[in-house]
Amino acid sequence: MGRGKVVDPGSSPTGPEIKRSKVEHIKEASHLLREPLATELQQDTSHFSEAAIQILKFHGVYQQDDRDARQQRRQEGLERAYSMMLRTRVPGGIVPPQIYLTLDKLADQYGNGTLRTTTRQAFQMHGVLKQDLKTVLASIVMQMGSTLSACGDVNRNVMAPMSPYKNRPDFVYAQAYASKLADVLTPEADAYFDIWVDGERVELPEDPDVALARQFVGQGVRDPHSPEPLYGTQFLPRKFKCAIGIPAENSVDIYSQDIGLIVITDPGTGQLKGFNILVGGGLGRAHNKDETMPLLAQPLGFAPPAEVLKVVQAILAVQRDNGNRQDRKQARMKYLVQNWGIRKFRQAVEQYYGQKLKRWRPLPELNPPGFLGWREQGDGKLFLGLFVENGRIADTPERQLKTALRQITERFGFEIRLTPTQDLLLVDIEPEQRSQVDAILQEYGVMPFERIPALVRDGMACPALPTCGLAIAESERALPSLLRQLDALLQDLGLGQESFVVRMTGCPNGCARPYLAELGFVGNAPDQYQVWLGGSPRGDRLATVFAEKVHVNGILDLLRPLLKHYQQHKFATESFGDFCHRVGFEVLRAQLAPDPVLAGVR
């Protein structure tokens, strides 16, 4: 299962073997992520078994069904309307034009006609039938794309600031190391290529830093004799998320990550000095289970460039060998860090790494990022940040964003970069091409970001219903209307110039990071939401539950007196989240007292 559990760094484990969860047994019996997936893929069925579904996730695919159609199909004696959602692996959100055009075509031929940008800078494609799955994945792989380890109990897509500032070394280093880190933490066994492209790997030159990092054995970090030297037969206890950020800009929500690396450069020369390392962030939780909670990552130390990939592998190995494999709700690394404490966790990492970590470097205050609209990228060229509401790239009667992006990509071949807020950038645009790009966008009704309310631009929702099997309430289909109503309320209260971070999820897993929002909505029953307040616009402070269950039609009634109090008592430049945190919930709840229903909100 591991290379030697660390109960106390330097000591041997004692006590009986702990019973493992069902998923742990499925992984161990999978022959390194092959079965029963490979066998069931050949069968003439519409869906996979539970065991195959668990293995399928490691290949970047979730099995779903149309929940809107469940009742009608049940009444008609039909099975569920099964389909697959696949997710790409694109470190730092960098998508070459040939991969984008491939995904665009596949979505029309085999999916539901849309693409969706995710909160981890990847693409999702919905609606692929089981019978077409191999064709779709093979097409992506042959274009040098991948879905490997986009899901499952492995490191997920590595995030990084996506703005192509060629004159900003910190941005350049962050993007370069996102690719290196993704490669080092990608599973190495052959099942993915054997199953989807019959063993035909698309070989690319290996980065020298990656090749060197893969030779690092440490104190039980990697097993050079295993086909899966870092992950082993059991892989990780639960999903694992990494991001690389830069000082003063937090587009990647660095404190929400299992591992966060922050680029440190020499202020005079711009030379890379190394990385500050954060560990133990994570936002997933479960309703009515107080032992589950969102947690912010904590400072671990500093690593120079030549050592950082080794340190990251050592951190992952500590979680691999010591994370909870009995209870999946307690299996994320954040709970190991919380239970051990950061000092003991650091000692364990140093034991695996083989030496002491260096001290954390001081950082400036974080600022909210900005990347929408036309901007200069520092080398004479431009980039364009396009708002994509809730990440859904589709053609609607009002605007044909999908068609516009396809025509722009076919005509100009721009690289696309996905943002952590579900938007996208078109990069390396010559100044003389700007008018042509604007003309195409205008032709298909794609509005400039300046014409979109700031509250709408800053909002974010997960897909939720009808595709996500975990969703309890609406999210993507509910937030657009709610945000526009909320914007109208701000206008009525004289707060039209204000905006704040609003995020919604259909369940408590937190895929759209609502617990880091200034105003978060978390579904806990059909059309009912928890309301979270007091997060930071900078992403460095968690929100807190203000109301446990509010009907979607009552949200504005709840917020109106709070926003009125904000308008009357806020500091000049104080954001809504900072205001709620400063004044406290006792004061905020006092604003609800005249209404006996709202006064009872807890």
Image (cartoon, grey):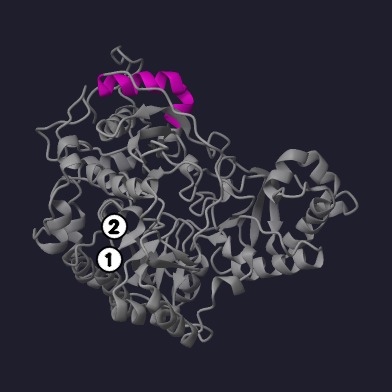
**In the figure, is residue 483 to the left or right of 303?**
right
Mark 1 vs mark 2: give the one in front. 1
First to last magenta residue range: 335-354
Q: Which mark is residue 49?
A: 2
Disc 1 to disc 2: CB gap under 8 Å: no
Q: Is residue 102 above or below residue 520?
A: below
Residue at horizontal 49%, vertical 58%?
Answer: 421
Kind of residue at badge 2: Ser
Q: Position of residue 333 (x, y in %)?
A: 40, 34
Q: Which mark is residue 278?
A: none
Element type at mark 2: loop
**In the figure, is residue 321 to the left or right of 453?**
left
Magenta portion: prevailing SS class = helix
Residues 285 and 494: in front is 494
Q: Is residue 11 above or below residue 416?
A: above
Q: Quadrant of residue 115?
A: bottom left
| Sequence-first disc among 1 and 2 | 2
Q: Position of residue 83 (x, y in %)?
A: 34, 69
Q: State how far apart marks 1 and 2 are (Cα).
A: 34 Å
Q: Which mark is residue 96?
A: 1
Q: Is residue 117 magenta?
A: no
Residues 572 and 544: in front is 572
Q: Position of residue 401 (x, y in %)?
A: 45, 78
Residues 245 and 394: in front is 245
Asked whether residue 326 appears in the rendered view, the answer is: no
Q: Position of residue 264 (x, y in %)?
A: 39, 36
Element type at mark 1: loop
Residues 171 and 446: in front is 171
Residue at horizontal 26%, vertical 51%?
Answer: 55
Asked whether residue 55 appears in the rendered view, the answer is: yes
Label total for image? 2
Q: Quadrant of the N terminus?
A: top left
